Image (spheres, rainbow, N blue to C red):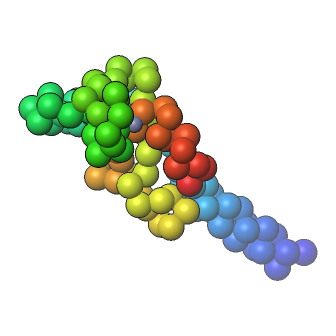
Amino acid sequence: MKEKKGIYEYILDGCQNTKLLNVRVFDEPTKKAVYARQTALARETGVSNCPLCAVGHDANHTRIWDLKDMDADHVTAWSKGGATDIENCQMLCRTHNRAKGNR
Ligand SMILES: [Zn+2]
């Protein structure tokens, strides 16, 4: 019985570690900081604050989106090992974020 108890404890620890690695949702302060950075740059260069709209040729090319109309996206896909931190975060308009699919 003593050995079994040891095994269960080991498995429990493993679960906790996995949980820590599974953070794939950006928190609000990160989103706001990235939004502010992208929007300032967009205003300066006269293009959209959605990087994918900015390289497009339709009416949204110069559109400045509201924070509520954008979603955070992993630059390097989370499923490919991209971190959930400010360096790997970009804000995309809802349409482009959806178009990229569930990454
Ligand atoms: Zn866009």
The N terminus appears in which quarter of the rendering?
bottom right
Ligand 1 shown in quarter: top left
Q: How many badges with numbers are in the image? A: 0
The C terminus appears in which quarter of the rendering?
bottom right
Residue 67, position in %: x, y?
36, 23
Q: Residue at x 73, y 68 (%)?
A: 11
**Residue placed most toward the observer, 100 or 12:** 100
Above/below status of 100 relative to 57: below
Whether residue 3 is visible to the viewer of this picture, yes or no, is: yes
Q: Residue furthest bottom?
A: 3
**Residue placed most toward the observer, 71 or 59:** 59
Q: Is residue 36 left or right of residue 12?
A: left
Whether residue 30 is visible to the viewer of this picture, yes or no, is: no
**Residue placed most toward the observer, 46 or 30:** 46
Q: Residue at x 47, y 59 (%)?
A: 77
Above/below status of 30 relative to 11: above
The answer to which quarter of the image holds residue 45 is top left
Q: Residue furthest right?
A: 1
Q: Is residue 87 left or right of residue 72?
A: left
Residue 6, position in %: x, y?
76, 73
Q: Is residue 25 left or right of residue 40?
A: right
Q: Is residue 103 left or right of residue 14?
A: left
Q: Residue at x 28, y 24 (%)?
A: 64
Q: Residue at x 35, y 20 (%)?
A: 66
Residue 12, position in %: x, y?
71, 62
The answer to which quarter of the image holds residue 15 is bottom right
